Image (spheres, rainbow, N blue to C red):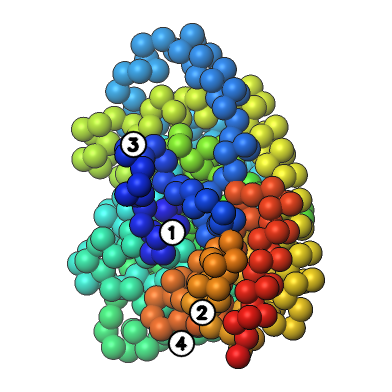
């Protein structure tokens, strides 16, 4: 999730050390461009204990090639956890361990798409998922999204015209819950409409469910996977946001035949289960209660950060902008009035704050007046200060 890859150089020429992490510190800048957790919120000591217990319990089996679908204790715990946080849970046989949603998306597209297939993508969307999709010889077609998520009426029309043109739609990639970059969740009736269209036209929905656990105003909406017939949705679950991204652990949740297909793939046959040791550590965190406590702690901290940023934005931006208050996830999506986001970025950086301009998240020509702010990495006081700086920047950029 090198969110700044399109905005800044990932390595600093002035630093003689080889980099350890993605994040690039820019002194004096409160950088709301990064969709990263605050290092202070990563459970270092708890993970050290969990890793120790895994080695004590499983010994060499924790360090050997793992079962292709992921270690049993991990798949069993994921099944239980998903049943607890969604309308229905999968069987362990429908779950395959992944190295997080980036790797899982790449693998699922490799297995399901043929050259020339159409992959539908909501617009705006997570820009780095677009990079992953573009590593494959598929054609991407944008479907617009609004404040209620993917526009399923436009989707229906697009499917009709593609069908008339004899084109095959194979996949649709979507982040229906606490979207990156907009923070929006797909409205319930649109969730059902999307599932109906996928069922009618025979394409697979890839549901990127990276943010479900980070829900601040009540339970997250039901997943698409939970409301769809078996085989229609491949859901990508990640522990990057709810535990730690450096673990590289997630899960692909589908139906049992597709899970078997993933586990039978060459890469898992050769290398064994992905992130074997780290997924045992995640399962240990789950069983011991570390995971649940951590999610509660994160939701409390991120809720405070969201509230601090939203309150400050209301105060400093006034009529210069509108924004969507997210009910979960990492991001606030701002729409400016009469201000170009690129021009604002230059002024904001000079005043000591930064963000990602919205056009980065559009597949084609995007809006020049939107921007994404991540509230995950900074404490409330720093977010309030960043908003102040943004407000000053907006005042001096307004035309
Ligand atoms: C929507 C979305 N999908 C996937 C990812 C990356 O997931 P992972 O860290 O599990 O590879 C991110 C991270 O920002 C994201 O926002």
Q: Secondary structure at mark 2?
A: helix
Name the foreground residue: 248 vs 269: 248
Name the foreground residue: 265 vs 305: 305
Pointers 3 and 4 in contact (C-beta within 8 Å): no
Q: Of circles 4 and 1, which is in front? A: 1
Q: Which residue is mark 3?
A: 17
Q: Of circles 1 and 3, which is in front? A: 3
Left or right side of 134 for 115: left
Sequence-earlier tag: 1 or 3? 1
Q: CA distance from mark 2 to mark 3?
A: 33 Å
Residue pictured at 47% horizontal, 25% vertical: 280
Pointers 4 and 1 in contact (C-beta within 8 Å): no
Left or right side of 37 for 216: right
Residue pictured at 29% horizontal, 30% vertical: 272
Q: Of circles 3 and 4, which is in front? A: 3
Pointers 1 and 2 in contact (C-beta within 8 Å): no
Sequence-earlier tag: 3 or 4? 3
Estimate the x, y position of residue 158 in percent, counting from the top left.
42, 84
Left or right side of 331 for 165: left
Disc 4 crowd rating (10 Å Cα; few below 14, some 14-19, many 20+) is: few
Name the foreground residue: 18 vs 275: 18
Estimate the x, y position of residue 250 in percent, counting from the top left.
46, 41
Mark identifier at residue 4: 1
Sequence-earlier tag: 2 or 3? 3
Estimate the x, y position of residue 55 in percent, counting from the top left.
46, 13
Disc 3 crowd rating (10 Å Cα; few below 14, some 14-19, many 20+) is: few
- Which quadrant is home to the C terminus? bottom right
Disc 2 crowd rating (10 Å Cα; few below 14, some 14-19, many 20+) is: some
Q: Which residue is mark 4?
A: 157
Mark identifier at residue 343: 2
Task: Identify whether 169 is placed above or below 80.
Answer: below
Residue pictured at 28% horizontal, 73% vertical: 139
């Amino acid at each position: 999730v090198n969110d700044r890859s399109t905005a800044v150089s990932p390595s600093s020429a002035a630093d003689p050390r080889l980099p350890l992490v993605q994040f690039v510190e820019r002194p004096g800048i409160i950088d709301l461009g990064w969709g990263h957790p605050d290092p202070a919120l990563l459970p270092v000591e708890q993970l050290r204990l969990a890793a120790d217990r895994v080695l004590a319990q499983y010994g060499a089996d924790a360090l050997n090639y793992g079962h292709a679908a992921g270690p049993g204790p991990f798949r069993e715990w994921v099944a239980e956890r998903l049943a607890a946080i969604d309308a229905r849970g999968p069987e362990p046989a429908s779950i395959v361990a992944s190295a997080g949603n980036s790797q899982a998306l790449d693998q699922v597209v490799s297995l399901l798409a043929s050259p020339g297939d159409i992959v539908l993508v909501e617009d705006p969307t997570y820009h780095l998922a677009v990079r992953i999709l573009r590593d494959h010889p598929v054609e991407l077609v944008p479907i617009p999204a609004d404040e209620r998520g993917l526009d399923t009426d436009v989707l229906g029309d697009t499917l009709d015209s593609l069908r008339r043109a004899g084109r095959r739609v194979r996949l649709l990639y979507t982040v229906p819950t606490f979207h990156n970059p907009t923070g929006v969740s797909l409205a319930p009736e649109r969730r059902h409409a999307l599932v109906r269209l996928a069922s009618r036209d025979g394409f697979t929905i890839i549901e990127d469910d990276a943010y479900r656990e980070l829900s601040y105003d009540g339970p997250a909406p039901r997943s698409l996977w939970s409301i769809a017939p078996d085989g229609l949705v491949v859901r990508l679950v990640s522990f990057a946001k709810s535990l730690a991204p450096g673990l590289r652990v997630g899960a692909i949740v589908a139906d049992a035949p597709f899970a078997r297909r993933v586990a039978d793939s060459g890469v898992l046959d050769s290398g064994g289960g992905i992130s074997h040791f780290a997924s045992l550590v995640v399962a240990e965190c789950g069983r011991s209660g570390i995971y649940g406590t951590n999610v509660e702690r994160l939701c409390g901290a991120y809720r405070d950060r969201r509230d601090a940023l939203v309150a400050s934005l209301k105060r400093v931006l006034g009529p210069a902008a509108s924004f969507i208050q997210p009910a979960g996830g990492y991001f606030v999506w701002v729409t400016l009035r009469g201000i170009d986001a690129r021009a604002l970025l230059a002024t904001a950086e000079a005043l000591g704050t930064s963000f990602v301009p919205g056009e980065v998240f559009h597949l084609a020509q995007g809006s020049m007046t939107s921007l994404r702010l991540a509230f995950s990495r900074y404490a409330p006081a720093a977010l309030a200060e960043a908003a102040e700086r943004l407000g000053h920047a907006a005042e001096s950029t307004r035309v």
